[in-house]
């Protein structure tokens, strides 16, 4: 394990300078966080990454479904990209402004690589050769009631416009297993609105269950070169459907081959 | 890069300020035949003893300014005399009088007396520090500085007044509005410099926003460059490097009291008479307000900064 991290550290050192980047990423801190997350990633959530052969050493706009009430799925995807790829990267998840405004958490997340989900930030990061992680379902995706688990919510189109503007390839990802962290959930939507927070889930368990996680990476998708970032919504619709469908297919495949908590406990 | 014009007769408003004095020195060095007239409402002292520089303490009234404009034939006006917005720096009426009424008079007279160029020093505080600020705000970003803090209202209004005036009169007079990031240096005594240098000033442990710093010498050179070569417009002034608040405090090396922001906020309220820390600056200790400098670099060239943020902080540490 320590040898693995030594190798990763070397590779990341080659890619990133020791300095913080303008968005506050501190590579050393990010790696220290990954070291802490790693036992949870490997042994508690038993994460398996599929399709890493699709990932080449260049910047991507990584687009994923969003599940699990709290954004553990984002942390697991970031850990996978930093530890399991031939050319490790610190993914830059674009996060809600609610997170960046929080004491401690906002600082911790930005030092680990998170960035306020904003068009200028996204374009600037891609321009600098960084890969960004986007959840186009937004809070609607993560904050679902039990009956809606694994139902992909409508994607927003902003990420497509940014991918066109930056000429970035879109890497579709599906995370399967995260909805089972909290099997029984009731979203207190009105109370959340009153408290001015993005979501307030009422859950049967306080700590996420050790549900095995499968991360499926799909084939990268390139948008046509002649498409303008200012194209009409209708012109983008086809591409939005294609990406949604890709992620839906990966999710369905993952659900068919899903490993359950019970199977894990038995084995 | 734009062509540079020769400056002959320059009015500097706010000559008592350290930045104005450095700017005057650079102007004299670059244009030995220049005539500079420096004015300030404060008592003027320790001004460089140069034959090219005359100074005058005056009340910022229309009559006084008109008399001065008639006597001198200014081709360029450098308005560096905005009053700071700390609650400890005088009452709000005085600030509004100088920042808004005074500036308006100066702009009107500049137009009336056929000046060719006006450079106005605004501040990055007009953008405000917000949790949803993207990194590298462009000049067209909304001015949200006074959303939370009424004490920044005159600063935002002055900026808006100048930019409105600038576009309205762009065919008659070249006007440049500069919005610099934090200006630091051994001679500058602004709030952020004082904060960084104050031992045991509270430093939030739960936030670590990114900061940009420009050295006073670089800032003065950019003001001169703006007068010589910038065309009408608004320009952010910031270097390429960005540094976190904790890193900046670390470089200065003064011991800080590391506490959660909630304690910093309370201390700022309680200790106002002793600790001259404007309340609005608390937000700058939480959230970023960093600037995109591409417009300035496109027009003045890429090599306008002699000191990086780190070097500027190192130099501040030495004094």
Image (cartoon, coloured by chain):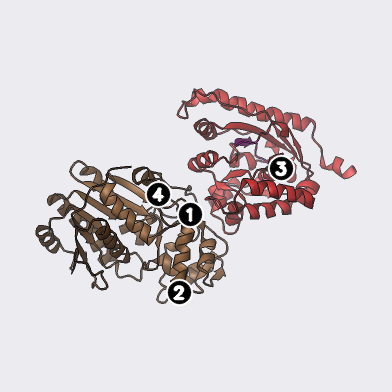
Chain colours: A red, B brown
Chain letter belonging to callout 1: B
Q: Which residues are magenta?
A: A57-69
- On screen, residue A239 versus residue B9, left or right, reads right
The question of residue A64 being in magenta is answered with yes
Nearer mark to the viewer, of 4 and 2: 4
Mark sitting on residue A80 = 3
Pointer 1 and pointer 3: residues touching (CB < 8 Å)? Answer: no
Q: Residues within 10 Å of mark 4 (few under 14, many from 20)?
A: few
Q: What subunit carries mark 3?
A: A
* Vertical arrangement, residue A92 with respect to residue B106, above or below: above
Q: Residue furthest bottom?
A: B274
Q: Rounded to the nearest whole Å, what is the CA distance between mark 1 and mark 4?
A: 25 Å
Secondary structure beneath label 4: loop
Vertical comparison of A102 with A230: above or below: below
Position of A259 with respect to B55 (left or right) is: right
Q: CA distance from mark 2 to mark 1?
A: 25 Å
Q: Residue A256 location in percent, x, y?
A: 78, 30
Q: Is residue A163 magenta?
A: no
Q: Which residue is mark 4?
A: B303
Provide the major secondary structure of the magenta segment: loop
Residue, disc 2: B270
Can residue B120 be seen in this snapshot?
yes
Q: Which residue is mark 1?
A: B288
In the rendering, at what x and y percent does residue B27 appear? Answer: 26, 58
Q: Quadrant of the C terminus of chain B?
A: bottom left
Circle 2 or circle 1, nearest the eye: 1
Label 4 resides on the chain identified as B
């Amino acid at each position: 394990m320590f040898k693995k991290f030594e190798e990763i550290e070397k590779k990341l050192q080659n890619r990133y300078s020791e300095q913080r980047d303008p968005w506050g990423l501190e590579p050393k801190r990010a790696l220290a966080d990954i070291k802490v997350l790693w036992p949870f990633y490997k042994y508690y959530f038993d994460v398996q990454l599929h399709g890493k052969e699709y990932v080449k050493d260049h910047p991507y706009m990584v687009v994923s479904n969003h599940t699990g009430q709290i954004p553990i799925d984002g942390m697991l995807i970031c850990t996978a990209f930093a530890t399991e790829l031939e050319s490790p990267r610190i993914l830059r998840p674009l996060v809600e402004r609610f997170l960046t405004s929080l004491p401690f958490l906002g600082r911790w997340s930005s030092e680990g690589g998170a960035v306020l989900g904003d068009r200028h930030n996204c374009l600037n990061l891609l321009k600098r050769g960084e890969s960004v992680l986007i959840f186009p379902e937004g809070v609607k995706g993560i904050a679902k009631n039990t009956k809606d688990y694994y139902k992909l919510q409508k994607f927003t189109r902003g990420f497509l416009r940014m991918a066109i503007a930056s000429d970035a390839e879109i890497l579709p990802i599906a995370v399967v297993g995260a909805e089972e962290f909290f099997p029984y959930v009731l979203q207190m939507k009105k109370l959340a609105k009153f408290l001015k927070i993005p979501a307030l889930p009422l859950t049967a368990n306080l700590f996420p269950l050790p549900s095995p996680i499968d991360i499926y990476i799909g084939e990268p998708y390139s948008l046509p070169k002649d498409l303008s970032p200012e194209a009409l919504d209708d012109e983008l619709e086809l591409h939005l459907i294609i990406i949604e469908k890709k992620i839906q297919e990966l999710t369905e495949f993952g659900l068919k081959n899903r490993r359950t908590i019970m199977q894990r406990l038995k084995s | 890069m734009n062509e540079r014009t020769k400056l002959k007769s320059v009015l500097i408003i706010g000559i008592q300020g350290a930045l104005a004095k450095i700017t005057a020195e650079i102007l004299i060095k670059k244009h030995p035949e220049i005539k500079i007239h420096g004015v300030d409402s404060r008592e003027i002292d320790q001004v460089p003893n140069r034959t090219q520089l005359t100074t005058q303490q005056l009340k910022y009234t229309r009559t006084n300014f008109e008399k001065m404009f008639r006597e001198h034939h200014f081709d360029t006006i450098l308005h560096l005399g905005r009053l700071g917005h700390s609650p400890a720096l005088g009452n709000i009426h005085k600030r509004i009088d100088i920042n808004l009424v005074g500036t308006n008079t100066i702009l009107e007279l500049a137009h009336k007396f056929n000046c060719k160029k006006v450079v106005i020093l605004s501040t990055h505080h007009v953008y405000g520090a917000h949790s949803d600020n993207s990194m590298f705000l462009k000049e067209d970003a909304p001015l949200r500085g006074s959303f939370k803090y009424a004490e920044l209202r005159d600063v935002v209004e002055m900026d808006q007044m100048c930019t409105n005036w600038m576009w309205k009169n762009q065919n008659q007079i070249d006007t440049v509005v500069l919005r610099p990031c934090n200006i630091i240096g051994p001679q500058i005594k602004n709030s952020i410099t004082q904060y960084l240098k104050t031992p045991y000033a509270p430093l939030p442990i739960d936030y670590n926003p990114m900061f940009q710093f420009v050295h006073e010498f670089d800032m003065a050179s950019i003001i001169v460059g703006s007068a010589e070569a910038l065309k009408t417009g608004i320009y952010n002034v910031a270097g390429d490097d960005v540094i976190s608040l904790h890193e900046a405090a670390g470089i200065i090396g003064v011991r800080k009291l590391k506490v959660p922001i909630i304690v910093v906020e309370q201390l700022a309220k309680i200790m106002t008479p002793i600790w001259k820390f404007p309340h609005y600056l608390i937000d700058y200790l939480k959230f970023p307000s960093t600037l995109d400098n591409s417009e300035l670099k496109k027009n003045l060239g890429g090599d306008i900064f002699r000191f990086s943020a780190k070097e500027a902080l190192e130099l501040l540490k030495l004094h």
